[in-house]
Amino acid sequence: MRILASYYCPISFLSLLLCWRFIPLDLPQTDRVAIDNFDDALSESWRGRYSDFATTYTIKSEADNRYLAASSEKSDNFIIKAIKVDISQYPYINWKWRARTLPVAGDEAVKNKCDVTASISIVLNKSKLLPKSIKYSWSSTLAKGTQTSSPYAIWPSRCDVLVKESGSDLAGQWITEKVNLLEDYQRLYKKKRVKSKFVYALVIMTDSDNTGTLAEADYDDIFFSKE
């Protein structure tokens, strides 16, 4: 993934500017906060790293379900959606994903291999120059449970990478994830007590530019929940 301005994988400074040109969503107080179930066309609330993001991220259907399909060939495009969710109230981030094609030798810890089958990143602050995020990934090579950081991160900017799935053993199967984002934030940032903590954007990225190969994955049913 190429460095744009002063930012790093997976969100560029220019794309954050695009994100905050519109107002983050103040979402209703319920047991869950829906981000997208992709039952309709990709909404205008999603922005891409590049204007042609719709060639990489498309809505497809199978049986009675619609989902987001990502197909990246030598590309580092992503999509980003502005949100405003208090993770002290909605600590869990939930989603489904399915790996189809893994970028060959992709490794999120190494610059020249920094490609990923599938990833969901949560942007923790509004800073366009020094952003901080937590990225959950389906890695080609890093073992499930690995914790690393983006090789493009320039201190004090920060992007922690947590590997949720790895390799091709589960490729072709829908996998449901449920992550306690609040606990990860507290652990990574050494916060003992959090009265309130808003997050401001969600990024979906399947990319393959560094390995020059093909990466394909599907995403569905993304939401925050109280439990």
Image (cartoon, rainbow, N blue to C red):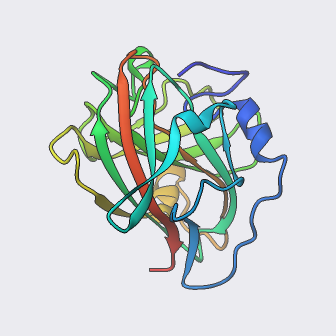
Q: Residue at x 75, y 48 (%)?
A: 126
Q: Where is residue 1 shown, x and y percent of the image?
A: 53, 22
Q: Residue at x 58, y 45 (%)?
A: 133
On-image quarter of the C terminus: bottom left
* Residue 49 drawn above or below residue 202: above
For the question of whether residue 160 can be seen, the reply is yes
Q: Where is residue 87 shown, x and y percent of the image?
A: 59, 68
Q: Is residue 95 left or right of residue 88?
A: left
Q: Is residue 168 left or right of residue 217?
A: left
In this view, the residue farthest toward the bottom is 30
Q: Residue at x 25, y 41 (%)?
A: 166
For the question of whether residue 158 can be seen, the reply is no
Q: Residue at x 40, y 42 (%)?
A: 118
Q: Is residue 150 left or right of residue 35?
A: left
Q: Where is residue 108 shown, x and y percent of the image?
A: 40, 29
Residue nearest the observer in this picture, 28 or 145? 28
Residue nearest the observer in this picture, 223 or 74? 74
Residue nearest the observer in this picture, 16 or 46? 46
* Residue 147 drawn above or below residue 77: below
Residue nearest the observer in this picture, 83 or 55? 55
